[in-house]
Amino acid sequence: MIHNKPTHYPIHTAILNNQLNSVIQLLHVNNTALQKDSNGWLPLHYAARYANKEIIEACCQFSTNKDTPDAMGRTPIMIAAESGRLSAVITLIGYQAQVDLSDSAGLGILHYAVKSGKLDLVRWLIEHTHLDINATDGQNQTPVQLSETNLSGTDKNKISSFLLEHGAKLTLLPPYG
């Protein structure tokens, strides 16, 4: 069991321990859904990273903005993608979380999905959203370039091959103004 810490609130602990009834009771307390930890994480960020579908749904029902960024500009759906949690990503999209946002480093949900090494997540995003497969981050890296530099072995080969088969380019021409 995870206990309360000075860096987060009881709602965060309830989510970390997958205690649905406690989460629901705490969410009914005024502004609990808006309580940020020391990293700027709301309960929805915790749910996206650690919790089951029911807890994610409960947090979504009490969150007015599904796309609130943390201290690094990451939204809950980016946190879910970074963790390779396809079911969490699908649930958040069902609650209108935006897939076309970028964090403070220019990374989008597809970049995070690639970094997770989860082909099923990358595949689902390409097949079910209108994400730009060649979107660049703040360092001008596309998802396929990120795959080539950050992954290894089978994950790298499968994800890179999938992205290339679906129109990703290993090199992009610089924009001309």
Image (cartoon, rainbow, N blue to C red):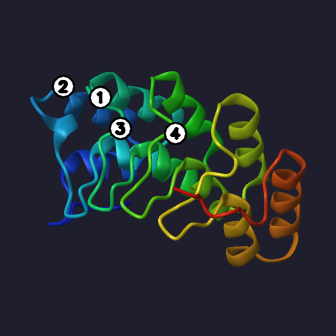
Mark 4–mark 2 Cα distance, whole angstroms, equals 19 Å
Mark 4–mark 3 Cα distance, whole angstroms, equals 19 Å
The front one of 171 and 88 is 171
Q: Amino acid at mark 4?
A: Asn
Q: Residue furthest front?
A: 177
Q: Determine which of the numbered discs, if any, sits on residue 28 in the image.
A: 2
Q: Nearer the viewer, mark 3 or mark 1?
A: 3
Q: Are marks 4 and 1 in contact (CB under 8 Å)?
A: no
Identify whether 40 is placed above or below 23.
below
Residue found 74% across the figure and 62% down from its top: 144
Q: Determine which of the numbered discs, if any, sits on residue 52 in the image.
A: 4
Q: Are marks 3 and 2 in contact (CB under 8 Å)?
A: no
Asked which secondary structure carries label 3, the reply is: loop
Q: Earlier in the sequence, mark 4 or mark 1?
A: 1
Mark 3–mark 2 Cα distance, whole angstroms, equals 21 Å
The front one of 147 and 70 is 147
Q: Amino acid at mark 2?
A: His
Mark 3–mark 1 Cα distance, whole angstroms, equals 20 Å
Which image quarter: residue 136?
bottom right
The front one of 63 and 161 is 161
Asked which secondary structure carries label 1, the reply is: helix
Residue indicated by mark 3: 67
Asked which secondary structure carries label 4, the reply is: loop
Identify whether 174 is placed above or below 89.
below
Q: Earlier in the sequence, mark 4 or mark 3?
A: 4
Asked which secondary structure carries label 2, the reply is: loop
